[in-house]
Image (cartoon, grey):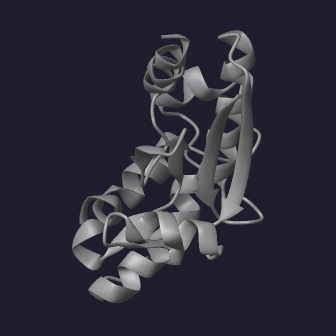
Amino acid sequence: MHDICIIGTIPPCPRCGLLKKMVEELIVEENITANVRHITYTDQEAIDFSKKYDLFPGTAKDVARILNQPIDLAELNQVKEDTNHIENIPYAAYNTFGWTYALDLYLRPYENNAKNAGILMTPILIIDGDLKHSGSVPTIEEIKNWLNQLHS
């Protein structure tokens, strides 16, 4: 049985929740036998995993604090309401957590600078011990490709 771990926040933020739901549903669609776990970035397992990359697990808020680039909470809340992006459409069937493409776009500068800040940024997707993605919601096609590699 394969082990898929999402490291994020608990309760899940919109991005962590969406990623977990997508993985859970796609393993069924792709006929993959896997245990899907969601752990908080403060768990020892998450800390130990991040140490392999000489990083610490953290959120965009941690990156912002370390880089002294505060997140504008009013603007962040506004982008969460932006449901008009065409990029939201493929995720609609999985999205019960309030995620929007605009949210990932808004947080992209923090994602891009996370490693410079020493952070492995959530959401973090690990499949069978291998880091597949961190810092944003990967595309559905990327997830399907990673899952299909499990058939080999």
- What residue sits 61% from the left and 67% below the top? 45
Residue 94 quadrant: top right
Residue in the foreground of this view, choosing between 83 and 22:
22
Q: Position of residue 24 (x, y in %)?
A: 73, 30
**Residue 41 shows up from this direction:** no
Q: Position of residue 67 (x, y in %)?
A: 28, 84
Q: Is residue 87 left or right of residue 69?
A: right
Q: Position of residue 148 (x, y in %)?
A: 51, 14
Residue in the foreground of this view, choosing between 26 and 90:
26
On-image quarter of the N terminus: top right
**Residue 3 shows up from this direction:** yes
Q: Is residue 81 left or right of residue 108?
A: right
Q: Is residue 112 above or below residue 88?
A: below
- What residue sits 34% from the left and 55% below the top? 108
Q: Position of residue 63 (x, y in %)?
A: 37, 77
- What residue sits 53% from the left and 34% below the top? 84
- What residue sits 52% from the left and 45% below the top? 126
Q: Is residue 48 above or below residue 122?
A: below
Q: Is residue 102 above or below residue 121?
A: above
Residue in the foreground of this view, choosing between 127 and 24:
127
Residue 46 quadrant: bottom right
Residue in the foreground of this view, choosing between 53 and 141:
53
**Tag count in the figure?**
0
Residue farthest to the left?
Answer: 116
